[in-house]
Amino acid sequence: MARLLLRDFDIRKAYLDGHAQAQLVDMLRPILKSAPLFRPTTASGKEMSVRMTSAGSLGWVSDKAGYRYQDLHPKGMSWPAIPDPILDIWRDLASSERDPDCCLINYYGEGTRMGLHQDKDEADFSWPVLSVSLGDDALFRIGNTTRGGKTESIWLNSGDVVIMGGPARLAYHGIDRIRFSSSRLLPKGGRINLTLRVAR
Ligand code: SIN
Ligand code: MN
């Protein structure tokens, strides 16, 4: 496992081996069944290209009313619990004192992207955000804590974990594109990104 620091983003290359990645995908299947992926719209009404759902006591949603955490899926069901192997990653790399209350599950299909943004819907920015990459390679772009300025990019591969804490916690970041079908982890291709957060 190699550790890379890029603008205070703490990147653990190949933190999860192939077996651990496959185990996580298996655990996500029942979650996606009981809390199906949905396509959110931004506050301005534009459809996002990724589809998402959540596990945990809170889930992140976005629609015309804005970005927020809420305790129910848009279809009305509770979010499923975060599986222990996912919490173990947080406990190992982020904090053994408090577990995250949200695991956002983003699915990137062919041609999807995520624009540069800050994660700032949480109550306390002293908790890091931890992200886990599964499936196809993704070009991750890192910016500054204010909009604009120079950015840097790095390819994230399946099994990589990124910890955004300290000065990186409020830095702009996004996914420019994925290399569809570059991984065989997900039978239909694409990429899953898990983001663990203490939201409240
Ligand atoms: C995000 O910032 O919400 C997702 C980042 C990623 O997909 O790696
Ligand atoms: Mn983000």
Image: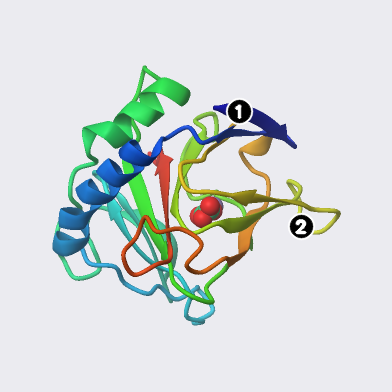
The percent coordinates of residue 140 (x first, y second) are 64, 54
Quarter of the image where one finds residue 138: bottom right
Seen at 60% across and 28% down, the residue is: 2
Instruction: Determine if residue 115 is in view.
Output: no
Three-letter code for the amino acid on which mark 2 is drawn: Arg
Q: Residues within 10 Å of mark 2 (few under 14, many from 20)?
A: few
The percent coordinates of residue 11 (x first, y second) are 60, 35
Quarter of the N terminus within the rendering: top right
In the picture shown, does residue 129 fall above or below 73? Answer: above
In the picture shown, does residue 115 fall above or below 27? Answer: below
**Closer to the N terminus: mark 2 or mark 1?**
1
- Classify residue 86 as left or right of residue 199: left
Q: Which residue is mark 1?
A: 2
Which numbered disc covers residue 55? none
In the picture shown, does residue 172 fall above or below 123? Answer: below
- Classify residue 128 as left or right of residue 21: right
The local secondary structure at tag 1 comes to: strand
Marks 2 and 1 sit apart, C-alpha to C-alpha, by 30 Å
| Depth check, front residue: 58 or 132 | 132
Three-letter code for the amino acid on which mark 1 is drawn: Ala
Q: Which residue is mark 2?
A: 147
Quarter of the C terminus within the rendering: top left
The percent coordinates of residue 90 (x first, y second) are 39, 29
